[in-house]
Image (spheres, rainbow, N blue to C red):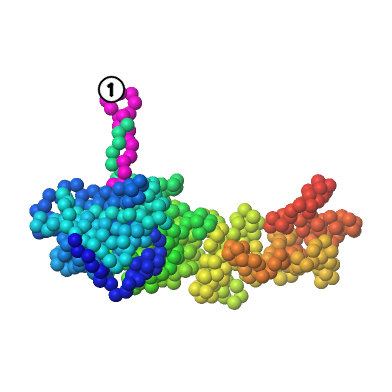
């Protein structure tokens, strides 16, 4: 038996590993399985290159939980290690056998050699009081070796008898890690981190039912439980896959999701870095937060994290799916990922690929693109708001939708409204309705003048409008019921009132006497006879600012302040009739009725005021 000291530069390496190198103790299982897969892939590579003639046999990696003995065993039939290799790769921390192997056997598939057998193995000591390694090299003349360490720099190593090549790691769990002695807990971790590793992984047995010919009831059989799918869809050639394959894989990733995604993008990049993956576009709900943490990041099929804030563009987190790259570091924290140069390049490239795919879909089949646009719009808006480069690309395929259900690109819509919808300062006015039903009176009034009205009823529309106003020169967005529209249409209206100045003042007094002057401001307008007798508008800036505060959940700087303009059409027959009434009660009732009708069109009439309106209407009828 050999005894010795592990070659490290500090006596405190184990506390550092245990407390700081890894953020979660459960990572130990991912590291050990990764090493086992690494060793197995090396063995397969040697055989494929003709460097070894061993019979590969069953390469399934086994994970065995022995609750009574308080141990976990991870067993592979990979390349194994000789005593010299144990000395080099285990006793000298931070050597990377994977890197040395690739250097020695150039031409091997580096994407399949995922492990860095060294620090990854030492994550075992986060949960184990001591660890055994029982290993036998594939080289027939190398005796098997047992290595043991209790979490200090001291170790023992001796020759043993071992029938098969490969490595068995035996973890003797510490008292504070007994949660990992539950097989169900281990299975959960294996499914989390190892669901798509390229070598079969077995843990425990499972019951299945098999139909037997001639018998009514299926026969119950017990068989090894295979945890993973070694050939996930994103590693396969897109040309060989169908839409059904992608839907099936989506259900595999998100078994609790009941809605199909809108469509998918299959990523397959080999320059300037290696990247594969599948991204799904789900139907985004009205709460963005609930959609986050659905993109899973992998390194050569090893799960790293789904906490990708700061790692990929914020809007990309609305997507679902998988990103896999060997160029992403495996054994690091998310904060390190956020600052890693390769990760930033990959992040930028993915955003470009998504934009390119959307543009391609738009050009190839615009009709189909318009069919999914209402579900896709939130994602494109979010990307445009948060990513300048994405916005530049999105201008080619972003679609405005008007109240008639027709779709227009930026350029198409500008050409449609440019001749007519300009204010006196020559600004192009984009009219929009946030709630078509509630604002129908104003929408119809705009349409009567041949104006076009956009439908902007999404929960990101206000933010998107604010962003567009800073991007589009000489352009402004105005809700169809805002006070700004008067400045747009004033050139078409009669500048003369049929009422004298004295009559107008008298009319204004009647309405001011029947409204809350702290909330409403009466304005007399010389509109057409065919227009409504009265409309209510709100200051565009104040209303939009309040809408943004509601969306962000902030407390309004305006408090409960509400301010509306009560615009009276002095040329309408009802205004003239009001002035002609001699009976004070009749005059008051008609004024109130006109005000309430205008308020009703804006959903501002509630409670007792609504009840009084109904009673007054019945009485007047």
Q: Where 484 sits versus 580, above or below?
A: below
At horizontal 14% and vertical 67% (from top left) the residue drawn is 104
At horizontal 61% and vertical 75% (from top left) the residue drawn is 424
Quadrant location of the N terminus in the rendered image: bottom left
| Furthest-bottom residue in this view | 425
Q: Is residue 447 left or right of residue 77?
A: right
Q: State yes or no: residue 160 in magenta.
A: no
Q: Where 146 sits versus 548, above or below?
A: above
| Furthest-right residue in this view | 583
Q: Is residue 12 left or right of residue 101?
A: right
At horizontal 16% and vertical 60% (from top left) the residue drawn is 82
Q: Position of residue 371 (x, y in %)?
A: 44, 52
Q: Position of residue 37 (x, y in %)?
A: 25, 56
Q: Which residues are magenta?
A: 202-219
Q: Nearer the viewer, residue 587 or 540?
A: 540
**Helix, strand or loop at mark 1:** loop
The quadrant where residue 321 appears: bottom left
At horizontal 32% and vertical 29% (from top left) the residue drawn is 218
Q: Position of residue 217 (x, y in %)?
A: 34, 26
Residue pointed to by mark 1:
214
Q: Number of callouts in the render? A: 1
Q: Nearer the viewer, residue 368 or 452?
A: 368
The crowd level at tag 1 (other Cα within 10 Å; few <14, some 14-19, many 20+) is few
Q: State yes or no: residue 208 in magenta.
A: yes
Q: Nearer the viewer, residue 149 or 253?
A: 149
Q: Position of residue 287 (x, y in %)?
A: 53, 57
Q: Is residue 267 visible?
A: no
Q: Is residue 178 visible?
A: yes
Q: Nearer the viewer, residue 288 or 121?
A: 121
């Amino acid at each position: 038996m050999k005894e010795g000291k592990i070659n490290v530069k500090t006596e405190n390496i184990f506390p550092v590993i245990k407390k700081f190198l890894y953020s979660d103790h459960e990572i130990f299982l991912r590291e050990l399985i990764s090493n086992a897969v690494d060793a197995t892939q090396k063995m397969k590579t040697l055989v494929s290159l003709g460097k070894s003639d061993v019979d590969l046999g069953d390469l399934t990696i086994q994970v065995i939980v022995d609750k009574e003995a308080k141990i976990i065993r991870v067993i592979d039939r990979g390349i194994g290690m000789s005593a010299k290799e144990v000395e080099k790769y285990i006793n000298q921390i931070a050597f990377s056998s994977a890197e040395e192997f690739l250097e020695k056997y150039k031409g091997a598939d580096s994407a399949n050699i995922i492990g860095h057998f060294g620090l990854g193995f030492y994550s075992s000591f986060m949960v184990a009081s001591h660890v055994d390694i029982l290993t036998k090299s594939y080289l027939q003349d190398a005796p098997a070796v047992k290595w043991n360490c209790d979490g200090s720099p001291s170790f023992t190593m001796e020759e043993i008898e071992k029938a098969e090549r490969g490595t068995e790691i035996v973890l003797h769990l510490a008292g504070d890690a007994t949660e990992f002695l539950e097989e169900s807990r281990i299975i959960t971790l294996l499914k989390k981190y190892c669901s798509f590793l390229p070598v079969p992984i077995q843990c425990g047995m499972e019951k299945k039912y098999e139909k037997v010919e001639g018998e009514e009831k299926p026969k119950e059989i017990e068989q090894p439980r295979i945890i993973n799918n070694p050939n996930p869809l994103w590693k396969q050639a897109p040309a060989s896959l169908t839409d059904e394959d992608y839907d099936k894989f989506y259900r595999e990733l998100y078994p609790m999701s009941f809605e199909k995604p809108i469509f998918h993008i299959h990523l397959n990049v080999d320059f300037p870095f290696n990247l594969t993956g599948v991204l799904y576009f789900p139907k985004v709900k009205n709460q963005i937060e609930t959609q986050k943490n659905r993109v899973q990041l992998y390194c050569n099929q090893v799960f790293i994290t789904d906490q990708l804030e700061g790692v990929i563009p914020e809007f990309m987190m609305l997507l679902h799916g998988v990103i896999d790259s060997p160029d992403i570091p495996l054994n690091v924290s998310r904060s390190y990922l956020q600052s890693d140069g390769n990760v930033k390049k990959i992040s930028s490239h993915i955003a470009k690929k998504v934009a390119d795919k959307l543009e391609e879909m738009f050009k190839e089949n615009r009709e189909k693109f318009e069919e999914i646009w209402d579900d896709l719009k939130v994602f494109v808006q979010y990307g445009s708001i948060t990513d300048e480069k994405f916005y530049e690309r999105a201008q080619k395929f972003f679609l405005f939708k008007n109240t008639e259900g027709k779709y227009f690109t930026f350029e198409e819509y500008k050409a449609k409204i440019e001749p007519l919808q300009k204010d006196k300062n020559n600004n192009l006015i984009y009219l929009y309705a946030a709630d078509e039903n509630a604002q129908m009176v104003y929408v119809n009034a705009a349409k009567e003048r041949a104006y076009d009205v956009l439908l902007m009823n999404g929960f990101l529309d206000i933010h998107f409008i604010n962003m567009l106003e800073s991007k589009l020169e000489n352009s402004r967005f105005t809700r169809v019921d805002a006070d700004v529209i008067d400045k747009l249409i004033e050139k078409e209206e009669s500048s003369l009132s049929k009422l004298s100045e004295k009559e107008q003042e008298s009319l204004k007094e009647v309405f001011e006497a029947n409204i809350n002057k702290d909330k409403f401001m009466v304005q007399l307008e010389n509109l057409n006879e065919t227009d409504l007798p009265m409309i209510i508008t709100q200051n565009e800036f104040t209303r939009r600012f309040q809408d943004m505060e509601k969306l962000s959940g902030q407390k309004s700087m305006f408090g409960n302040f509400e301010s509306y303009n009560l615009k009276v059409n002095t040329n309408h027959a009802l205004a003239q009739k009001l002035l002609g009434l001699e009976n004070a009660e009749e005059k008051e009732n008609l004024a109130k009725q006109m005000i309430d009708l205008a308020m009703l069109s804006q959903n501002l009439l509630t409670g007792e005021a609504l009840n009084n309106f109904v009673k007054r209407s019945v009485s007047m009828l």
